[in-house]
Image: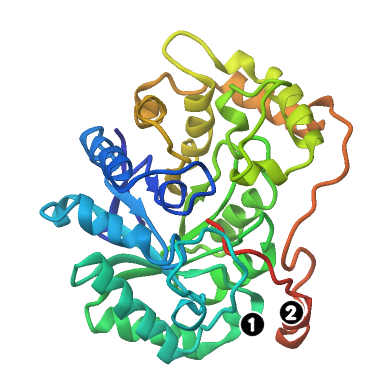
Amino acid sequence: MQFRTYKGTDLTVSAVGFGLWTVSTGWWGQFTEGEAVALMHRALDLGVTLFDAADTYGNGLSEELIAKAFPNQRDQIVIATKVGYDVANHGGDERRGQRAIPHDFSAPAITAATDAALRRLKTDRIDLLQLHNIGMEDVERDETWEALDRLVTAGKVRYTGFALGPAIGWMYEGIRAIERRPVTSVQHIYNLLEQHPGFALHEAARNAERDTMFLVRVPHSSGMLEGRYTVDTVFPPTDHRVHRPRSWLLNGIKKVDQLRFLEGPGRTLGQAALLWLLADDRVASTLPNIYDEAQLTEFARATDAPALADDEVGRIAALYANNFGVEEEPARFKGTMELPLSPEDAETARETVPANA
Protein backbone atom coordinates (compact mmCIF):
# COMPACT_ATOMS: atom_id res chain seq x y z
CA MET A 1 0.00 0.00 0.00
CA GLN A 2 1.17 3.49 -0.82
CA PHE A 3 0.57 6.34 1.63
CA ARG A 4 0.22 10.05 0.97
CA THR A 5 0.38 13.08 3.23
CA TYR A 6 -1.84 16.09 2.65
CA LYS A 7 0.28 19.09 1.74
CA GLY A 8 1.20 21.27 4.70
CA THR A 9 -0.22 18.80 7.24
CA ASP A 10 0.64 15.69 9.22
CA LEU A 11 -2.45 13.91 7.89
CA THR A 12 -1.27 10.73 6.14
CA VAL A 13 -3.76 8.41 4.42
CA SER A 14 -3.64 5.20 2.44
CA ALA A 15 -3.82 5.70 -1.32
CA VAL A 16 -6.83 3.40 -1.35
CA GLY A 17 -9.47 4.15 1.28
CA PHE A 18 -12.64 2.46 2.45
CA GLY A 19 -15.90 4.32 1.84
CA LEU A 20 -18.57 3.25 4.32
CA TRP A 21 -21.43 4.26 1.97
CA THR A 22 -21.36 0.85 0.31
CA VAL A 23 -21.82 -1.23 3.47
CA SER A 24 -24.11 1.06 5.47
CA THR A 25 -26.86 2.35 3.18
CA GLY A 26 -28.28 -0.74 1.46
CA TRP A 27 -27.91 0.83 -1.98
CA TRP A 28 -25.11 -1.51 -3.08
CA GLY A 29 -26.37 -4.73 -1.55
CA GLN A 30 -27.28 -5.64 2.02
CA PHE A 31 -24.56 -6.20 4.61
CA THR A 32 -24.93 -7.49 8.14
CA GLU A 33 -22.94 -5.76 10.83
CA GLY A 34 -20.65 -8.77 11.00
CA GLU A 35 -20.02 -8.74 7.25
CA ALA A 36 -19.26 -5.02 7.24
CA VAL A 37 -16.90 -5.26 10.21
CA ALA A 38 -15.10 -8.26 8.71
CA LEU A 39 -14.46 -6.31 5.48
CA MET A 40 -13.15 -3.36 7.48
CA HIS A 41 -10.81 -5.61 9.47
CA ARG A 42 -9.50 -7.13 6.25
CA ALA A 43 -9.01 -3.66 4.80
CA LEU A 44 -6.79 -2.63 7.72
CA ASP A 45 -4.83 -5.87 7.36
CA LEU A 46 -4.20 -4.94 3.71
CA GLY A 47 -2.90 -1.49 4.67
CA VAL A 48 -6.06 0.58 4.23
CA THR A 49 -6.07 3.24 6.95
CA LEU A 50 -8.61 5.80 5.67
CA PHE A 51 -12.27 5.12 6.52
CA ASP A 52 -14.75 7.63 5.10
CA ALA A 53 -18.21 7.92 6.67
CA ALA A 54 -21.08 10.41 6.98
CA ASP A 55 -23.90 10.98 9.43
CA THR A 56 -26.38 10.38 6.59
CA TYR A 57 -24.96 6.96 5.67
CA GLY A 58 -27.47 4.63 7.29
CA ASN A 59 -28.57 7.41 9.66
CA GLY A 60 -25.32 7.26 11.62
CA LEU A 61 -24.65 3.56 11.02
CA SER A 62 -21.42 4.14 9.10
CA GLU A 63 -19.87 5.95 12.05
CA GLU A 64 -21.09 3.31 14.50
CA LEU A 65 -19.47 0.62 12.33
CA ILE A 66 -16.09 2.33 12.62
CA ALA A 67 -16.40 2.37 16.41
CA LYS A 68 -17.38 -1.32 16.47
CA ALA A 69 -14.69 -2.43 14.01
CA PHE A 70 -11.80 -0.58 15.64
CA PRO A 71 -12.36 -0.15 19.38
CA ASN A 72 -8.65 -0.46 20.12
CA GLN A 73 -7.05 0.74 16.88
CA ARG A 74 -7.85 4.45 16.96
CA ASP A 75 -4.26 5.51 16.33
CA GLN A 76 -3.94 3.11 13.39
CA ILE A 77 -6.78 4.55 11.34
CA VAL A 78 -7.80 7.90 9.84
CA ILE A 79 -11.45 8.79 10.34
CA ALA A 80 -13.11 11.04 7.79
CA THR A 81 -16.78 11.89 8.13
CA LYS A 82 -19.28 14.45 6.88
CA VAL A 83 -21.91 16.79 8.30
CA GLY A 84 -24.35 19.26 6.78
CA TYR A 85 -27.61 17.43 6.20
CA ASP A 86 -30.22 18.09 8.89
CA VAL A 87 -30.16 14.53 10.20
CA ALA A 88 -31.17 15.66 13.71
CA ASN A 89 -34.61 16.77 12.53
CA HIS A 90 -35.11 14.64 9.42
CA GLY A 91 -33.18 11.43 10.07
CA GLY A 92 -35.68 9.41 12.08
CA ASP A 93 -34.95 5.94 13.35
CA GLU A 94 -35.04 4.07 10.06
CA ARG A 95 -31.70 3.01 8.58
CA ARG A 96 -32.01 4.51 5.12
CA GLY A 97 -29.57 5.12 2.31
CA GLN A 98 -30.18 7.92 -0.16
CA ARG A 99 -32.88 10.36 0.65
CA ALA A 100 -33.55 14.01 0.00
CA ILE A 101 -33.39 15.91 3.28
CA PRO A 102 -32.62 19.58 3.91
CA HIS A 103 -29.17 20.92 4.62
CA ASP A 104 -28.34 22.93 7.71
CA PHE A 105 -24.90 24.51 7.58
CA SER A 106 -25.52 26.97 10.42
CA ALA A 107 -22.84 27.11 13.09
CA PRO A 108 -25.02 25.51 15.82
CA ALA A 109 -26.03 22.68 13.49
CA ILE A 110 -22.46 21.99 12.38
CA THR A 111 -21.28 21.93 16.00
CA ALA A 112 -24.13 19.70 17.16
CA ALA A 113 -23.68 17.30 14.23
CA THR A 114 -19.97 17.02 14.93
CA ASP A 115 -20.58 16.27 18.61
CA ALA A 116 -23.11 13.61 17.63
CA ALA A 117 -20.62 12.05 15.21
CA LEU A 118 -17.95 11.95 17.91
CA ARG A 119 -20.35 10.08 20.20
CA ARG A 120 -21.18 7.51 17.52
CA LEU A 121 -17.52 7.12 16.63
CA LYS A 122 -16.58 6.82 20.33
CA THR A 123 -13.56 9.01 19.81
CA ASP A 124 -12.35 12.43 20.93
CA ARG A 125 -11.37 13.71 17.47
CA ILE A 126 -12.25 13.46 13.81
CA ASP A 127 -9.23 13.47 11.52
CA LEU A 128 -11.04 15.00 8.54
CA LEU A 129 -14.44 16.68 8.84
CA GLN A 130 -16.11 17.44 5.50
CA LEU A 131 -19.08 19.65 4.71
CA HIS A 132 -21.42 17.25 2.94
CA ASN A 133 -22.42 18.31 -0.57
CA ILE A 134 -22.08 22.08 -0.29
CA GLY A 135 -23.85 24.53 -2.59
CA MET A 136 -22.70 27.96 -3.67
CA GLU A 137 -24.58 29.60 -0.81
CA ASP A 138 -22.66 27.38 1.62
CA VAL A 139 -19.35 28.40 0.09
CA GLU A 140 -20.22 32.06 0.64
CA ARG A 141 -21.49 31.67 4.22
CA ASP A 142 -18.67 32.76 6.56
CA GLU A 143 -20.52 31.46 9.61
CA THR A 144 -20.14 27.87 8.46
CA TRP A 145 -16.40 28.05 7.90
CA GLU A 146 -15.87 29.90 11.16
CA ALA A 147 -17.66 27.06 12.94
CA LEU A 148 -15.19 24.62 11.40
CA ASP A 149 -12.29 26.74 12.61
CA ARG A 150 -13.67 26.67 16.15
CA LEU A 151 -13.98 22.88 16.04
CA VAL A 152 -10.33 22.66 15.03
CA THR A 153 -9.29 25.05 17.80
CA ALA A 154 -11.28 22.98 20.31
CA GLY A 155 -9.38 19.85 19.25
CA LYS A 156 -12.52 18.01 18.09
CA VAL A 157 -11.42 18.11 14.46
CA ARG A 158 -7.90 17.93 13.03
CA TYR A 159 -8.51 19.05 9.44
CA THR A 160 -11.45 20.21 7.35
CA GLY A 161 -12.72 19.94 3.80
CA PHE A 162 -15.87 19.47 1.79
CA ALA A 163 -17.57 16.98 -0.50
CA LEU A 164 -19.20 17.87 -3.80
CA GLY A 165 -22.31 16.06 -4.94
CA PRO A 166 -24.25 13.96 -4.73
CA ALA A 167 -24.26 13.64 -8.52
CA ILE A 168 -21.34 14.64 -10.71
CA GLY A 169 -20.90 18.37 -11.32
CA TRP A 170 -20.75 21.31 -8.88
CA MET A 171 -17.71 22.72 -10.68
CA TYR A 172 -17.85 26.34 -9.59
CA GLU A 173 -18.92 25.44 -6.06
CA GLY A 174 -15.65 23.54 -5.85
CA ILE A 175 -13.51 26.11 -7.60
CA ARG A 176 -14.77 29.02 -5.54
CA ALA A 177 -14.32 27.15 -2.25
CA ILE A 178 -10.81 26.08 -3.24
CA GLU A 179 -9.91 29.66 -4.12
CA ARG A 180 -11.55 31.33 -1.10
CA ARG A 181 -11.47 28.85 1.77
CA PRO A 182 -8.42 27.26 3.43
CA VAL A 183 -9.56 23.66 3.00
CA THR A 184 -7.31 20.64 3.27
CA SER A 185 -9.41 18.20 1.26
CA VAL A 186 -12.06 18.11 -1.47
CA GLN A 187 -14.02 14.95 -2.19
CA HIS A 188 -15.55 14.54 -5.64
CA ILE A 189 -16.40 12.13 -8.46
CA TYR A 190 -13.60 11.56 -10.97
CA ASN A 191 -12.62 8.59 -13.13
CA LEU A 192 -11.37 7.53 -16.55
CA LEU A 193 -14.85 7.77 -18.06
CA GLU A 194 -15.99 10.91 -16.20
CA GLN A 195 -13.08 13.34 -16.24
CA HIS A 196 -15.09 16.55 -16.21
CA PRO A 197 -15.28 18.57 -14.03
CA GLY A 198 -12.76 16.67 -11.89
CA PHE A 199 -9.78 17.73 -13.95
CA ALA A 200 -10.90 21.37 -13.79
CA LEU A 201 -11.07 21.21 -9.99
CA HIS A 202 -7.54 19.89 -9.75
CA GLU A 203 -6.31 22.57 -12.13
CA ALA A 204 -8.04 25.23 -10.03
CA ALA A 205 -6.06 24.14 -6.98
CA ARG A 206 -2.83 24.27 -8.95
CA ASN A 207 -3.58 27.64 -10.52
CA ALA A 208 -4.55 29.13 -7.16
CA GLU A 209 -1.36 27.68 -5.67
CA ARG A 210 -3.37 26.02 -2.92
CA ASP A 211 -2.23 22.99 -0.94
CA THR A 212 -5.70 21.48 -1.31
CA MET A 213 -5.71 17.78 -2.19
CA PHE A 214 -8.50 15.45 -3.25
CA LEU A 215 -10.39 12.36 -2.18
CA VAL A 216 -11.77 10.72 -5.31
CA ARG A 217 -14.96 8.71 -5.03
CA VAL A 218 -16.66 6.61 -7.73
CA PRO A 219 -13.22 5.91 -9.25
CA HIS A 220 -14.69 2.98 -11.19
CA SER A 221 -17.72 4.84 -12.58
CA SER A 222 -20.21 2.88 -10.46
CA GLY A 223 -18.43 -0.39 -11.15
CA MET A 224 -18.14 0.03 -14.93
CA LEU A 225 -14.32 0.24 -14.81
CA GLU A 226 -14.06 -2.99 -12.88
CA GLY A 227 -14.62 -4.53 -16.31
CA ARG A 228 -17.17 -7.15 -15.28
CA TYR A 229 -20.40 -5.81 -16.76
CA THR A 230 -21.92 -7.45 -19.83
CA VAL A 231 -25.03 -6.76 -21.89
CA ASP A 232 -26.75 -9.38 -19.73
CA THR A 233 -25.93 -7.69 -16.42
CA VAL A 234 -29.03 -7.12 -14.28
CA PHE A 235 -28.93 -5.14 -11.05
CA PRO A 236 -31.07 -6.10 -8.02
CA PRO A 237 -34.16 -3.96 -7.30
CA THR A 238 -32.52 -2.33 -4.25
CA ASP A 239 -29.29 -1.49 -6.11
CA HIS A 240 -28.97 2.21 -7.04
CA ARG A 241 -27.68 1.28 -10.49
CA VAL A 242 -31.05 -0.18 -11.42
CA HIS A 243 -32.31 3.39 -11.86
CA ARG A 244 -29.82 4.15 -14.63
CA PRO A 245 -30.97 3.97 -18.27
CA ARG A 246 -29.92 0.88 -20.18
CA SER A 247 -27.91 3.11 -22.51
CA TRP A 248 -25.55 3.79 -19.58
CA LEU A 249 -24.73 0.09 -19.40
CA LEU A 250 -24.43 -0.51 -23.15
CA ASN A 251 -22.38 2.62 -23.90
CA GLY A 252 -20.19 2.02 -20.87
CA ILE A 253 -19.35 -1.48 -22.02
CA LYS A 254 -18.34 -0.12 -25.44
CA LYS A 255 -16.00 2.37 -23.76
CA VAL A 256 -14.50 -0.18 -21.40
CA ASP A 257 -13.78 -2.57 -24.25
CA GLN A 258 -11.44 0.08 -25.67
CA LEU A 259 -9.60 0.28 -22.35
CA ARG A 260 -8.77 -3.41 -22.16
CA PHE A 261 -5.22 -2.62 -23.24
CA LEU A 262 -4.66 -1.45 -19.64
CA GLU A 263 -5.04 -5.04 -18.42
CA GLY A 264 -1.93 -7.15 -18.37
CA PRO A 265 0.37 -9.29 -16.29
CA GLY A 266 0.10 -8.12 -12.70
CA ARG A 267 -2.54 -5.44 -13.36
CA THR A 268 -6.32 -5.58 -13.64
CA LEU A 269 -8.48 -2.95 -15.28
CA GLY A 270 -9.83 -1.99 -11.86
CA GLN A 271 -6.31 -1.43 -10.59
CA ALA A 272 -5.40 0.58 -13.70
CA ALA A 273 -8.36 2.89 -13.06
CA LEU A 274 -6.98 3.65 -9.59
CA LEU A 275 -3.40 4.05 -10.84
CA TRP A 276 -4.55 6.57 -13.45
CA LEU A 277 -5.98 8.73 -10.67
CA LEU A 278 -3.02 8.26 -8.35
CA ALA A 279 -0.62 9.45 -11.05
CA ASP A 280 -1.85 12.91 -10.01
CA ASP A 281 0.00 13.97 -6.85
CA ARG A 282 -3.04 16.07 -5.90
CA VAL A 283 -4.99 12.86 -5.24
CA ALA A 284 -4.58 11.99 -1.57
CA SER A 285 -6.68 8.84 -1.74
CA THR A 286 -9.28 6.97 -3.75
CA LEU A 287 -12.55 5.59 -2.40
CA PRO A 288 -13.64 2.62 -4.51
CA ASN A 289 -16.94 0.95 -3.72
CA ILE A 290 -15.96 -2.12 -1.72
CA TYR A 291 -18.43 -5.00 -1.42
CA ASP A 292 -16.47 -8.26 -1.10
CA GLU A 293 -13.07 -9.48 0.04
CA ALA A 294 -11.73 -10.45 -3.38
CA GLN A 295 -12.46 -7.04 -4.82
CA LEU A 296 -11.12 -5.31 -1.70
CA THR A 297 -7.86 -7.24 -2.05
CA GLU A 298 -7.60 -6.35 -5.74
CA PHE A 299 -8.00 -2.62 -5.08
CA ALA A 300 -5.82 -2.52 -1.96
CA ARG A 301 -2.97 -3.99 -4.00
CA ALA A 302 -3.36 -1.51 -6.85
CA THR A 303 -0.27 0.48 -5.88
CA ASP A 304 1.78 -2.74 -6.11
CA ALA A 305 0.76 -3.17 -9.76
CA PRO A 306 2.81 -1.75 -12.67
CA ALA A 307 2.30 1.99 -13.14
CA LEU A 308 0.72 3.24 -16.34
CA ALA A 309 3.24 4.01 -19.06
CA ASP A 310 3.30 7.38 -20.81
CA ASP A 311 1.96 5.90 -24.03
CA GLU A 312 -0.93 4.32 -22.14
CA VAL A 313 -1.81 7.65 -20.55
CA GLY A 314 -1.66 9.32 -23.95
CA ARG A 315 -3.92 6.67 -25.47
CA ILE A 316 -6.46 7.22 -22.69
CA ALA A 317 -6.44 10.96 -23.35
CA ALA A 318 -7.04 10.45 -27.07
CA LEU A 319 -9.91 8.05 -26.45
CA TYR A 320 -11.56 10.38 -23.95
CA ALA A 321 -11.21 13.37 -26.29
CA ASN A 322 -13.25 11.43 -28.86
CA ASN A 323 -15.72 10.09 -26.24
CA PHE A 324 -14.34 6.62 -27.03
CA GLY A 325 -16.07 6.84 -30.41
CA VAL A 326 -19.48 6.49 -28.76
CA GLU A 327 -22.35 8.73 -29.81
CA GLU A 328 -24.60 9.55 -26.87
CA GLU A 329 -26.47 12.35 -25.19
CA PRO A 330 -24.19 14.95 -23.54
CA ALA A 331 -23.48 14.35 -19.87
CA ARG A 332 -25.80 16.08 -17.44
CA PHE A 333 -24.26 17.88 -14.49
CA LYS A 334 -25.61 19.27 -11.24
CA GLY A 335 -24.80 22.55 -9.56
CA THR A 336 -23.07 25.56 -11.07
CA MET A 337 -21.32 24.54 -14.28
CA GLU A 338 -21.04 27.99 -15.87
CA LEU A 339 -19.60 31.24 -14.52
CA PRO A 340 -20.50 31.62 -10.84
CA LEU A 341 -23.93 32.92 -10.04
CA SER A 342 -24.68 35.25 -7.20
CA PRO A 343 -25.45 33.41 -3.94
CA GLU A 344 -29.15 34.28 -4.37
CA ASP A 345 -29.28 32.87 -7.90
CA ALA A 346 -27.32 29.77 -6.88
CA GLU A 347 -29.82 29.09 -4.11
CA THR A 348 -32.65 29.24 -6.64
CA ALA A 349 -30.81 27.05 -9.16
CA ARG A 350 -29.77 24.35 -6.74
CA GLU A 351 -31.88 21.22 -7.20
CA THR A 352 -33.10 19.00 -4.38
CA VAL A 353 -31.36 15.67 -4.94
CA PRO A 354 -30.88 12.54 -2.81
CA ALA A 355 -28.01 12.56 -0.32
CA ASN A 356 -25.68 9.88 -1.57
CA ALA A 357 -22.00 9.16 -1.16
Q: Position of residue 74 (x, y in %)?
A: 16, 57
Q: Earlier in the sequence, mark 2 or mark 1?
A: 1
Q: Position of residue 200 (x, y in %)?
A: 66, 54
- Is residue 262 found left or right of 14 in the rendered image? right
Residue 229 lies, with reference to residue 136, above or below; the image says above
Label 2: how many Cα within 10 Å (few below 14, some 14–19, many 20+): some
Residue placed farthest to the top in the image? 265
What mark, if any, has residue 75 been given in the picture? Answer: none
Q: How is the image coloured?
A: rainbow
Q: Amino acid at mark 2?
A: Ala
- Using the rendered view, name the quadrant where residue 1 is placed: top left
Q: Amino acid at mark 1?
A: Glu
Give 251 or 24, whichever is nearer the viewer: 24
What mark, if any, has residue 346 been given in the picture? Answer: 2
Q: Position of residue 115 (x, y in %)?
A: 29, 80
**Can residue 8 be seen at all in this image of the molecule?**
no
Residue 246 lies, with reference to residue 258, above or below; the image says below
Disc 2 to disc 1, C-alpha distance: 7 Å
- Is residue 202 found left or right of 347 in the rendered image? left
**Can residue 94 be seen at all in this image of the molecule?**
yes
- Is residue 120 found left or right of 59 in the rendered image? left
Task: Say if mark 2 contacts mark 1, CB within 8 Å.
Answer: yes
What mark, if any, has residue 137 been given in the picture? Answer: 1
Give 233 or 191, whichever is nearer the viewer: 233
At a point 62% along the width and 51% down the height, the residue shown is 198
At a point 35% along the width and 29% down the height, the residue shown is 293
- Is residue 57 found left or right of 330 in the rendered image? left
